[in-house]
Image (cartoon, rainbow, N blue to C red):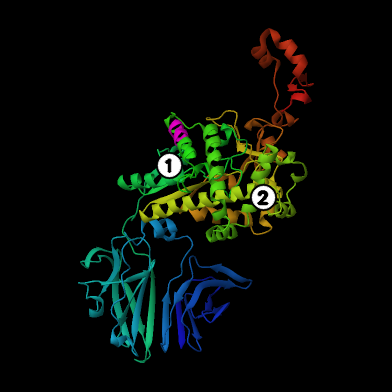
Amino acid sequence: MLLHFHLHYKTILGQQIGIEYFMDDDPKMKKLLFQTFDGQNWTGVMNLEGKTTIFTYNYIIVDNEGLSLREWGNARIISPGENKNVFIEDQWRSRDNENNAFFSSAFTEAIFKRNKKPVKALKKDKRLTNFNKITFRLHSATIPSHLSFGISGNDPSLGSWTTALLLNDSHFPICELTIPNEHLNIHLEYKYVLVEPDTKKIVLWEEGNNRLCHFVVPDFDNNQLIITDEHFRYGKPNWRGSGVAIPVFSLRSRKGLGIGEFSDLKALVDWTKVIGSNIIQVLPVNDTIANKTWVDSYPYASISVFALHPLYINLQNIALLKSISDQKALQKSTDDLNALESVDFEKVLETKFFYLRKLFAQEYDHFIKDREVMLFLEENKTWIKSYAVFCHLRDKFKTCNFNAWSTYSTFSTDVIEALCNEQYSEYRDIQFYYFLQYHADKQLLEARDYARKNGVVLKGDLPIGIYRYSCDAWVAPELYNMNEQAGAPPDDYAVLGQNWGFPTYNWVEMSKNGFLWWRQRMQQLNRYFDALRIDHILGFFRIWYIPTNQVEGTMGLFNPRIPLSKEELVQYGITGDLTRYTTPYNTLHILSQTFGNDMDEVFDIFFSKLPDGRIVFKTSFDT
């Protein structure tokens, strides 16, 4: 069997088109380079020896130094069957095509999710055996779930422009149709259409010129032509979305314990669907329990970028308390906390953990033997042990400041293995945090799946920073500049700037392993969300950082930043002692206005006077 590839793509001198591929009987990735006569039409031929069920490939561009560019998107897949020749006509998938966004799970798994049974392939035509055939493939996800893609064209085999043939969408977002071909010289014009699948009525024709297929096959002996087209051509923006942004803790319901919970997202999904919207944006949902005070209610200072917040767990979805007295006590706590006008974070934290520990003790024997739990721990082994140990040591030493943890202040895998061991006297407390994360994960996934089922996108939030005394900082402090604080410079909304207290990222160190921490973090977010807001995205390119001995954002500077040379400063009329412009100072006039009759006493205690008359803080107070 011969595979004949053709791709139209204009290259520049020194570039060559090819494919990376592997086959079902040989998973090793290989490469085939194409040839061209004009630098635009690239062709390649491959001889498949033996029977190949699945052939997987992607187009690449190579130059003299090796791989230069790989096309965007998932791998292409064909099933060659027993054809003598398979002619493959493809289009390069560009990374900057705005339609690529529609192939994300937000659309394929939620908004455009195929809710109906897949459109099945037509009953196999006897003429498709030992004969010529043409397969039309449309790679497009932008279609309402109640409609189907179809095709119509200038040949009776394509409906003669009057009727449409439905495409099989069992491999959505690839939809395809195979028809027999009775011509050696193929001259087809066609368009894709949107079809009401039950009535076969054409709802919408795609815009633009007719698509063309001009091809000559060598003979009538079992040849197949596969044409892959990219994107249904809508004449105007084909989708607009709307939604609601809300923190999970605000989704209070009678089923919760004084605070919004992951299970409450289902009710919000129902409401979102009823009003015709399709996106729910939540604030960060990671664990923020650092000091066990109301300060921990701030959702942008998590103690782990991987662990979910235990307060968003619904107790009843774990199990019912077997003790009647415990049930009554829980119900009273629920009624009291839900009756409050706002969330009492500290009381909720205390109450919920009290009952979470009761449930853990009650369900312990089943939990440690549950195969799903074992699978969860294996899937999350890169972070969950260190997180559980961090929480255990935070409780043990009554502080999240790991610098005060005695022999545990410096992270080591030996400590993790020693404490995550059945021989450790407090190992059950480590398991308690496994228990929390397992159920938080389970409940958030259920909410995500419910949203997808109802055509609603669950959108997450990625904070720009990490908490200074977080598990992440304890495990790998080298990844962060711990002597710096991230913030924002002064502006009309914050005249003193902003100091968030987060350490900045050490991008050089992070790059040494290919930004593994970031890839793992994004994968974890992708587990729960189909879209993502990136908080303070400018900070990934340029951050305002403040030394740790400073308080206000005014004392920061940008990194990276473009310096001014002395020559440039002279052009602006700036000469002499540059500390005049780089070091904060006061004047006697300002002190007099501020302190009045107390000025002399204040000056003697706090200030010094420079030879040029500037008033500066003494060293003891110059932060």
Residue 504 in picture, x, y percent from top left: 65, 44
Q: CA distance from mark 1 to mark 2?
A: 39 Å
Q: Which residue is nearer to you in this view: 594 or 174? A: 174
Quarter of the image for residue 134 reads bottom left
Picture layout, residue 536 above or below residue 138: above
Find the residue positioned furthest to the front: 324
Element under disc 2? helix
Residue 1 in picture, x, y percent from top left: 46, 88
Is residue 289 something one can see in this rendering? yes
The disc, 1 or 2, on the residue closer to the chain's N-terminal end is: 1
Picture layout, residue 377 above or below residue 272: below
Picture layout, residue 291 above or below residue 442: above
Is residue 560 something one can see in this rendering? no
Which span of residues is magenta-colored? 331-337
Few, some or many residues within 10 Å of mark 2 (<14, 14–19, 20+) = some
Residue 164 is tagged as none
The nearer-to-camera label among 1 and 2 is 2
* Residue matched to label 1: 245
Few, some or many residues within 10 Å of mark 1 (<14, 14–19, 20+) = few
Is-magenta flag for residue 38? no
Is-magenta flag for residue 333? yes
Residue 427 is tagged as 2
- Residue at the image position 64 percent from the left and 59 percent from the top: 514
Picture layout, residue 113 above or below residue 255: below
**Amino acid type shown at disc 1:** Ala
Left or right? Give the position of 199 relative to 118: left
Q: Main secondary structure of the magenta part?
A: helix
